[in-house]
Image (cartoon, rainbow, N blue to C red):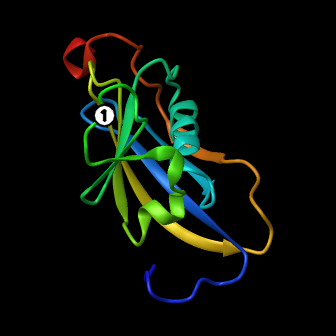
Amino acid sequence: MATNSPQPPGQSVFRLRIQLQDVEPVVWRRVLVPGSVRLAKLSGILLAAMGWTDSHLHAFRVGDKLFGMHFEDWAEDEIDEKSVTVLQALRGERRFFFDYDFGDSWEHEVFVEELTWSYFGLKFAVCLDGQNACPPEDVGGTGGY
């Protein structure tokens, strides 16, 4: 995933493994995601795959960059998640973090298992595999669970 090499023809497709941190048993999903979707759309994909209701704020941490919803008093260094695609945001990173519900502090570690290029467009994200359900919403994070 070199950032300076020319892109192959076709569409980028990421295979991601999402794992909820600090819970037992392990909760994880494997999804295929088009690289052309914006991070705002990726948040919906991750939330749906994990089983969250999307009723709280969230943010992405990719390397030293923070991508978020730009809701009310956002951090000065936060980049609007609607302005960047998955391919642009990852730029060679092999893992990143997705934080959901800042009160309960659910942290998801996301691994880029594979980046492929397809002549055939992937119109929707696809959940390939996974195990266990997420904790219920608003239980107080890992301590309440």
Q: Secondary structure at mark 1?
A: loop
Along the viewing direction, whichever of 22 and 120 lies nearer the viewer: 120
Q: Residue shown at 52%/19% (left/top)?
A: 53
Q: Residue shown at 25%/43% (left/top)?
A: 76
Residue type (three-letter) at the residue carrying disc 1: Trp
Give the x, y percent position of residue 125: 66, 48
Q: Is residue 61 above or below residue 13?
A: above
Residue at which label 1 appears: 74
Quadrant housing the N terminus = bottom left
Q: Residue shown at 24%/58% (left/top)?
A: 64
Quadrant housing the C terminus = top left
Give the x, y percent position of residue 79: 38, 49
Horizontal placement of 116 versus 119: left or right? Answer: left
Residue farthest to the left, as pictured: 143
Horizontal placement of 66 versus 18: left or right? Answer: left
Horizontal placement of 132 versus 6: left or right? Answer: left
